[in-house]
Image (spheres, rainbow, N blue to C red):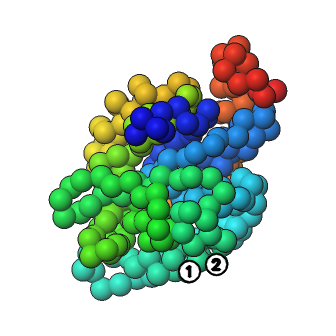
Amino acid sequence: MDSEKNKYKLGITLSGGGAKGFAHLGVLQALNDRGLYPEIISGTSAGAFAGVLYADGNSPHEIVSFFKETTFNKFAQFSIPKGGVFKSTPFHSFLDKKLKAKTFEELKLPLYVTATNIENGEVEYFNSGSLIPPVIASCSVPLVFTPVEINKKYYVDGGLIKKFPVSVLRPKCEKIIGVNVSPLVESKYKNSINYVAERTFHYMSNVNMLQDRQLCNYLIESEVLCKYRLFDLKNIEEIFQKGYEITQKYLEKHKKEFHKDFAEFI
């Protein structure tokens, strides 16, 4: 660990958050437009999804273009409920088609993907070997998607234990930008099982974010994104734009600090 201390000048951590994760791409685009390019990424769930596509060498705009006219059904296959209502087979096919890299080692940027071992309740960080299974595991919301088997162990959404994996990057980076697209805010009650399930997972996963939020040098988050649902794939471009605008305002507000920390900041 000591040999990696402050090995990277800038790292970025991308939180979980379902479809709100498309805001991560807007954030990355805004950072790139100001001359800031992360050298290492950690992500959970939606953050792992956005992170792997970006680390594979795609620009944020290119990634958004992958999802034109996309619905949730294109990423999930209904199954007779055992470990979950949906299989992730279509999701696997999508990543297999879009990713040039098939292993972590082949990515353009180092990436840490967070998943939860459903058997022992421990968080695990994947950063080597086969790429697609850990990313799918990190995105597998319990009861919605079936757990993913990796090396004879079963994994579900990393957000269950570690929704905002800043700590894995902290010893390795001089500065970390944390992006939380799913802050804890009030949401008016709706008499539906979807609402109850989504809010329950939201509360459970946000509890484990408090310590990691404090580890960021810069923390980008906004309540603006909270109106979007977990599987809202109809407003991808809008969510992307919100992430971009939030980051532009944040960078302008903290431009003195960024100019001090990063000579390349525009």
In the displayed structure, 229 sits above or below 32; it is: below
Tell me, yes or no, if residue 50 can be seen here: no
Q: What percent of the width, then of the height, locates residue 201?
A: 32, 51
Residue 145: quadrant of the picture: bottom left
Is 76 placed above or below 15 here?
below
Q: Which mark is residue 16?
A: none
Residue under numbered circle 2: 97
At x 51%, y 41%, the residue is 13
Report whether 150 appears left or right of 110.
left
Q: Position of residue 150 (x, y in %)?
A: 34, 72
Residue beneath the point at 53% across and 24% down: 217
Q: Is residue 16 visible?
A: yes
Q: Quadrant of residue 69?
A: bottom right
**Tag 2 and tag 1, C-beta contact below 8 Å:** yes
Is 236 placed left or right of 173 in the picture? right
Percent position of residue 118, x then y:
23, 63
The C terminus is located in which quarter? top right
Q: Residue furthest bottom?
A: 80
Element marked by disc 1: helix
Where is residue 263 shown, x and y percent of the image? 76, 23
Q: Residues within 10 Å of mark 1 (few under 14, many from 20)?
A: few
Give amino acid for label 2: Lys
Residue depicted at x 39% and y 46%: 163
Q: Whole-Å distance between the Cαs marked 2 and 1?
A: 6 Å
Q: Is residue 239 left or right of residue 43?
A: right
Q: Quadrant of the N terminus?
A: top left
Residue 93, numbered label: 1
* Three-letter amino acid code at the position of disc 1: Ser
Q: Is residue 205 above or below residue 178?
A: below
